Amino acid sequence: MSSILLHSASALALSCLTAMPALAQDASPLTDIITVSGQQLDAERLDRLDPATLPPSGPDAAALIARLPGATVVGNGVLSSQVQYRGLSGGRINLRIDGQNFASGGPNLMDPPLHYAPIALIERIEVDRSVSPVRSGPGLAGGVNAVFKQVGFGETDQWQTRYDLTLAGRTAGDSSSVGGVVGMANDQFRIQLLGSSESGDDINWPGGTIGGSAHERLVYGAGLGFRTGVHEFSLDLRRQETGATGNPPFAMDIRYFDTDFARVGYRGDWDGVSVTAHLAFADVAHAMNNYDLRPAPMMAAMYRESLATAQTVSGGGDAVFAALGGSLRLGFDGEQAEHDLAITNPNNANFVLNSLSDITMERTGAFAEWTGAVAGWESELGLRADRHRAEAGPASVGSAVPAMPGMLVMAFNATDRRLDDTTLDAVARLWRPVNDSTTLRLTFARKTRAPGYVERFAWLPTEASGGLADGNTYVGNADLAPETAWIAEAGLDWSSATAYARPTLFYRSVDDFIQGVPYDATPGVIDTPVEMVSAMNGDPTPLRFANTDARLYGLDLDFGVGLSAAWHLDGTASWVRGERRDIDDNLYRTAPPSLRLGLTREAAAWSATLETLAVARQDRVSAANSEAETPGYVLVNLYGSWTLREGVSLAAGVENLFDHSYRQHLAGYNRNAGSDVGLGERLPGTGRSLGLRLTLRG
């Protein structure tokens, strides 16, 4: 499928994108590509690539995606942010890192997939517009794939050395990073080493310092490839070591994530049939505690450290061949993830709660996808079916744990802990060039998501919620049904010699939408063991995950106009409404409307951009979840870049130029007492920050 690239001018409005939408008549305008490195990509996938400016920013790759129309960031910590796309986030977005799916190591999603994508290692981020195609797996929202830099094959049998390195610094938290890829290649072999190292102290905001917001991350790995004729084989190995990293909206901070990745791949041509296959493995070991990066509890009995592991084996393959006047792709994929979580007190070896023990989550799927012309429309039509199996082992507690959690253990162990579901997805993505300047887009889909292991098996009321970071305690529900979204979208891509616009209207009706609801019909009345345990932990009104019904609809677009040969104005606008259909209420945690505008001056060797981001007040909040409103705000940013010589570029930028104090609606609430942010207050945005980045390529 061909891809569409955004204008480099949106360095102001989308400062990470690299080209204006060039809508070729035979292109599929269904994928946005954020190019981080500015390297040339496969011309068959892109209509045009113009090297662009990436403003220097923090280590959070989610912040890049948040510049796209319809997207925003859920700020849970400098290395723990998630993406919300058209009102959906977390497991509802099909996120991959270098094409690999894997399970998070933490039950509170302290390591969402983009935690494993340092910006210095990313070549590009591919974002499926509207919905993810069936070949990419299930998921209610669009898909995201962060593709790492790679040393490609050469053109001759002569070995060549190649490198792509980035050095960056930022005054917010006095952070710094260095990373990239180096290697050698000829027309048959390629070999590479990659790595990055990042660190930063606590982040400043206009009111002081956000306590416990420091970070450490180290990544290193190697890759090789072999090509013979029309067959290509690859092997990639990578290890990530996240050190002491703060998570102020959570009850604990990261002590470590030690994660290993391995992936082998094949692609080739068999008499006109294109075949791909892959097998991958990920192993996450995680520890978090409540005393290293925040004031320790006053009593030794309140010290907590949670130890979690997750191992994922995934694989799949497909074959693409000509059929029915177009191209037919048939494939299969699957994954198995195993999880364990133990909550301990380092001061008491007998205090342990094996709260999520021997969890196994399996998915096996098959799909068919046809691309071709139907009644004058270019189309991508897909079907997939997935079989899901979830199973939990018996829970247990140590002898120092109070009696009431022991009662919950016995009740949980007496339940049927093996669950099975089947989901069916169907996607029709259509586009039709009307003339040389306009392409119409339509999408109709049925998309699904199976419940996660915390949503199903969390018997102990804790704040583990898949990253909501809202201070509530949650318990799971074994009777949850998979979510099913019915989707309709319409849009157009228009461009002329001096302007472009890409508006999209969308509507999603979600049956069995999973959300936290009051544990029983008498919230605040502590009359069940779950409520008693939750009250002991400071929350007398626990929530349970339940199937509800929801709808999400809205409009987003990006646009731009050339004012002269050297000046252009670009922007994005996003608006989404989330509503419950089963009761009269708003959907919990939906981003407010926003508008990003920027003015860019371009010259032969440099460019400068003045950017304004306006975010509206969010007063359409969930009463059922006691969600607080947030005021609107306006930020001003300034960026510039210079090409010093071929292969060497320098970028500089100032975020929040006027040091404005603001709160993002999707940010979590502070739980760190050693901070200039009050306990229970919504975390503030970063204050004025200067960033620099040097890029070396050859």
Image (cartoon, rainbow, N blue to C red):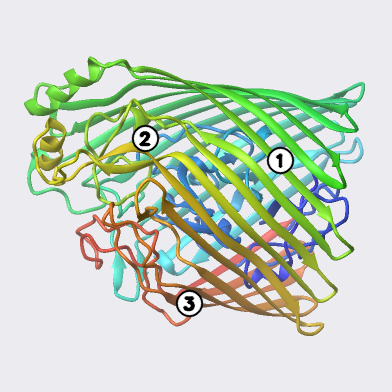
Please report contact status of discs 1 and 3: CB closer than 8 Å, yes or no: no
Q: Amino acid at mark 3?
A: Leu
The residue drawn where x is 51% and y is 69% is 594
Q: Amino acid at mark 2?
A: His
- Tell me how far mark 1 sits from mark 3, CA to CA: 39 Å
Q: Quadrant of residue 521?
A: top left
The residue drawn where x is 32% and y is 66% is 629
The mark closer to the camera, 3 or 2, is 3
Task: Return the residue at label 1.
Answer: 428
Looking at the image, is 480 positioned above or below residue 215? above
- Image location (x, y in percent) of residue 483: 47, 36
Secondary-structure class at tag 1: strand
Q: Which mark is residue 286?
A: 2
Q: Amino acid at mark 1?
A: Ala
Q: Specify which label sits upstream in the sequence, 1 or 2.
A: 2
Image position of 560 (left or right of 515): right
Task: Return the residue at label 3.
Answer: 635
Is any atom of residue 396 visible in this view? Answer: no
- Image location (x, y in percent) of residue 591: 45, 60
Q: Quadrant of residue 343?
A: top left
Secondary-structure class at tag 2: strand
- Tell me how far mark 1 sits from mark 2, CA to CA: 40 Å
Looking at the image, is 220 positioned above or below residue 170? above
Q: Which of the image's four quarters has the C terminus?
A: bottom right
Q: Specify which label sits upstream in the sequence, 1 or 3.
A: 1
Image position of 595 (left or right of 536): right
